[in-house]
Image: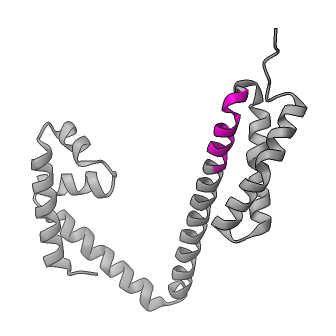
Amino acid sequence: MSKELSVCDEEVFGSIFKDHFKYLQNLFYYKFGDLEKAKDLMQDSFIKLWKNCKDVPYDKAKGYLFMLARNSFLNDVNKQKTIQKHQDSVDKNLLYIESPDFVLEEKEFLNKINREISLLPDKQRQVFLLNRIDEKTYKEIAEMLDISVKTVEKWMHDALVTLRKKIGKV
């Protein structure tokens, strides 16, 4: 009777590590161009495999490891995007933060937008606010108001056309 291999067995895990660490490290290095980051992400993938070794059959270990690596890559990319978006926002705000003219212009513009939104017909205003402020989808709005999605699209289109005419493109 042969004993089934377990990923939790240190020798088996060591063998998986030896067989795949260089490939994963090179893959991450190729993706990021940073050897230290590549080593960190490769190591994180193996740590996660070890933490979940009881749930991973030996014959699925390689696939699971590559799924972990892919997820680590995607998580890091999303993290970098978030950091960059925040940095861009901070940089943009720093340009205007001290300018009284900008503060006044922004306040006047927001007042103009709010005034024009308040002048929209009730149905258009309601759909516009639900979509743009409450971030509801057209389908959610249609269900809330018991109307068709096409009606929501039409009212939203009309609201946007009106606002563009009154406010102009920014």
Q: Reply yes or no: does residue 60 show up in magenta.
A: yes
Decide if residue 122 is in sight here. no
Occupied quadrant, residue 5? top right
Magenta segment boundaries in residue numbering: 58-69
How far across and how far down the image is residue 117, in percent?
20, 65
In this view of the protein, can residue 82 be seen by the observer? yes
Q: Considering only vertical position in the picture, is 145 above or below 24?
A: above
- Taken as a whole, is the magenta stretch helix, strand or loop? helix
Is 30 a magenta residue?
Answer: no
Q: Residue at 12% across / 70% down in the picture?
A: 162
Q: Nearer the viewer, residue 98 or 13?
A: 13
Residue under the point 54% across and 76% down: 88
Judging from the image, the colouring scheme is one colour
Q: Position of residue 40 (x, y in %)?
A: 78, 57
Residue 43 as seen in the image, left or right of residue 75: right
Quadrant location, the C terminus: bottom left
Most extreme residue toward the front is: 1
Q: Position of residue 81 (x, y in %)?
A: 56, 65
Residue occupying image coordinates x 84% and y 39%: 15
Dividing the image into 4 quarters, which one contains the N terminus?
Answer: top right
In the rendered image, residue 133, in percent from the top left (x then y), is placed at 33, 56
- Note whether 107 is above or below 73 in the view shown: below
Q: At 30% from the left edge and 48% from the top edge, which residue is drawn?
A: 136
Asked whether 19 or 110 is in front, the reply is: 19
